[in-house]
Image (tube, rainbow, N blue to C red):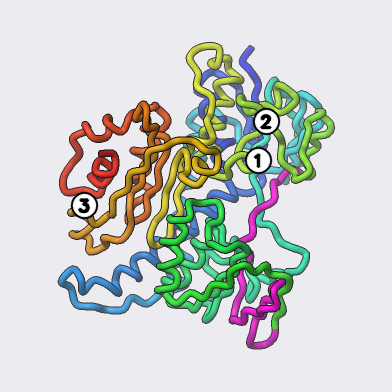
Amino acid sequence: MPVRMVIIGGGPGGNTAATYAARLGAEVTLVERDVVGGAAHLWDCIPSKTMIATGGAMSFSKRIEGMGLSHQDAILDLDAQRKRVQEIETHINGQITTLLQSQGVRLIRGTGRVKGPHEVVADTDDGIEEIVADAILVSTGSRPRIPDWADPDGERVLTTRQAYPPSTMPEHLIVIGSGVTGVEFVHMFSSFGAKVTLIVSRQQVLPSKDPEVAAALEDELLRRGVKLFKGARAESVEVSSSIVAVSCDDGRVARGSHALLAIGSIPNSDGLGLEAAGVEVDAAGYIPINHHCQSNVGHIYAAGDVSGKLPLSSVAAMQGRKIAEHVMGIHTREHRHIDYEKAASAIFTEPEIADVGLAEAEAFATGRKIRVTKVPYAAAAKALINDDPGGFVKILSDPATGVVLGGSIVGRHAAELISVLALAVTANLKVSDIVESCLAHPTLSEALADAAE
């Protein structure tokens, strides 16, 4: 009898686990209440990157004279943008659904919850169905966090999911939160021509990132005319007929036409009946997992945002694959656990930002000896050809062995280029391995070899 696996939530973690486990011979049922592909992925990640790509095209159109072209202003069409976002979402959703069906995964449209250690209940339009499971995966994602001092109305005060795109273009947007999501929205709407004020609770944007990287982004934001409220925490949002006012704990008040909340997310673990199976949930609502992505109940797993690990689609998908391997016993053979500290991440601003592995500030804080090499983007001929030479590549390595420990890239296509450093960090390659690679010319990747020298 095949292993019966039931998955609650069809995001990157859930649908990857489903297709991979089915391929390995499991009998897989996937219960999804919203959208196959994941709400956080298809309602957050994909729309934001789609709009950022449009904003990038608009920004590029304003500096094409540097490439020998006459300048013409691009004009944003919100209706066309909305249609474009929806078409991309629909296409990706369709691809994932087709893949699941091709692998024999049973897809139930409804809300799943755990009834007992080996039982999942699906509430559907046709009624309630009980499913017996040998293994259960909870991959229910997260939702935007809304503080008690804010009341989003979807018109003037927005959550992230109400801004792809908003019903009207903000004249002056106040973004609350300077993490990855916040700065991407700042970049996006400033590219569209809106005035933007960013509420920064710390003394730098991207507080968890390399200060040098954060400084490069801050310089660009200031160049664009973005107003930064540093060291300020928002405490209230008041809406009048013409103004949205955000009051901060230091007495400053930001005034604009719209406000956007970008202050994190909350895991979707409530209402799942996890207590019925004895699954532990921490105070923040996350399901603690071990290196196999198991909860405290061995046959019940968690993946994606609800697991409390890095909230990245790529990490969730990797977790899903590893869970499928564990459920099907593949882990007893050659198997590599997920090393979350070696996961690459990217921020789609201008300049684009990406990093992987050990950060310079972290190394200094722990007293670890490292070798840091850095070269400007301008060292690569391709950056000059693109008329976009701003940015740099920084590589951290072990001074004794030459093994690549981490790196940061600031500049065009950083999210693509970081893959080279991610491979080097994951495979314990040396800087000499990058130097000895004969890279194509002229390309931006040549800056990686230069930085590895």
**Residue 152, position as x, y percentages in the image:** 69, 69
**Residue 92, position as x, y percentages in the image:** 46, 47
Neighbor class of circle 1 (other Cα within 10 Å; few <14, some 14-19, many 20+) is some
For disc 3, the marked residue is 380
Neighbor class of circle 2 (other Cα within 10 Å; few <14, some 14-19, many 20+) is many
Q: Mark 2 vs mark 3: which is more N-terminal?
A: 2
Please tell me whether mark 2 or mark 3 is closer to you in this view.
3
Q: Nearer the viewer, residue 425 or 74?
A: 425
Neighbor class of circle 3 (other Cα within 10 Å; few <14, some 14-19, many 20+) is many
Tell me, for residue 155, which label it has, or none.
none
Q: Secondary structure at mark 1?
A: loop
Asked whether disc 1 touches disc 2, contact meaning CB atoms under 8 Å apart, the reply is yes
State left or right for residue 317 relative to residue 120. Answer: left
Q: Is residue 362 magenta?
A: no
Estimate the spatial distance between the alpha carbons at disc 2 and disc 3, rounded to whole Å.
Answer: 43 Å
Q: Is residue 86 visible?
A: no
Asked if 391 appears above or below 16 in the picture, the reply is below
Amino acid type, residue under disc 2 in the picture: Ile
In this picture, which residue range is highlighted in magenta?
Answer: 240-269
Amino acid type, residue under disc 3 in the picture: Ala
Estimate the spatial distance between the alpha carbons at disc 1 and disc 2, rounded to whole Å.
Answer: 8 Å
Tell me, for residue 308, which label it has, or none.
1
Q: Which image quadrant for residue 282?
A: top right
For disc 2, the marked residue is 289
Amino acid type, residue under disc 1 in the picture: Gly
- Point 60% across, 69% down: residue: 199
Asked whether disc 1 touches disc 3, contact meaning CB atoms under 8 Å apart, the reply is no
